[in-house]
Amino acid sequence: MAETLKKGSRVTGPAREQLAADLKRKYESGASIRALAQETGRSYGFVHRMLSEADVTLRGRGGATRGRKNPTP
């Protein structure tokens, strides 16, 4: 994925399978969807869809949650 894809161009067949495999490998190595989108020149939604098609278990958003606080005794 050295070169970015032309925005809006269709990615089909073996090229799509190769892109999905590359995105999966990088995402599972810790890259974010946003970073992959920027690297490929595609949208967040496109990368998200490609990862979903590749049966990747997506990570949670992370950060602080609004969970119930435990009172201290």
Image: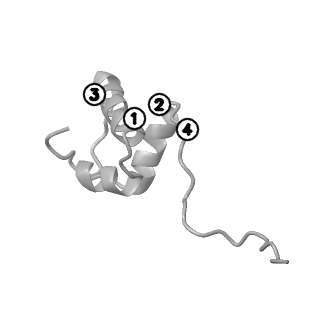
Which amino acid, by three-letter code, is at mark 2?
Ala
In the image as oriented, which residue stretches furthest toward the top?
14
Read off the residue under disc 1: 24
Tell me: 32 left or right of 55. Answer: left
* Measured Cα–Cα span from mark 3 to mark 2: 13 Å
The image's mark for residue 57 is 4
Of callouts 3 and 2, the N-terminal one = 3
Report x, y in % for residue 22: 31, 33
Q: Which residue corresponds to mark 2?
A: 54
Secondary element at tag 3: helix
Which residue matches tag 3? Answer: 15
Given the image, on which type of amino acid does mark 3 rest?
Ala
* Marks 2/4: CA–CA distance: 9 Å
* Disc 3 from disc 4: Cα separation: 22 Å
Q: Nearer the viewer, residue 13 or 22?
A: 22
Q: Secondary structure at mark 4?
A: loop
Query: Residues at badges 2 and 1 in contact (C-beta under 8 Å)?
Result: yes
**Which of the two marks, 1 or 3, is nearer to us in this view?**
1
Tag in front: 3 or 2: 2
Image quadrant where one finds the C terminus: bottom right
Which one is nearer the viewer's eye here, 73 or 26? 73
Of marks 3 and 4, which one's residue comes earlier in the chain?
Answer: 3
- Residue shown at the point (39%, 42%) measured from the top left: 27
Q: Can you tell which quarter of the image residue 19 is in?
A: top left
Above-or-below relation of 67 to 27: below
Q: Amino acid at mark 4?
A: Thr
Which quadrant would residue 16 be assigned to in this image?
Answer: top left
Q: Give how far across and how far down residue 32 sits, in percent.
A: 39, 52
Q: CA distance from mark 1 to mark 4?
A: 10 Å
- Front label number (2 vs 1): 1
Q: Mark 1: which amino acid?
A: Lys
Whichever of callouts 2 and 1 sits on the residue coming sooner in the sequence is 1
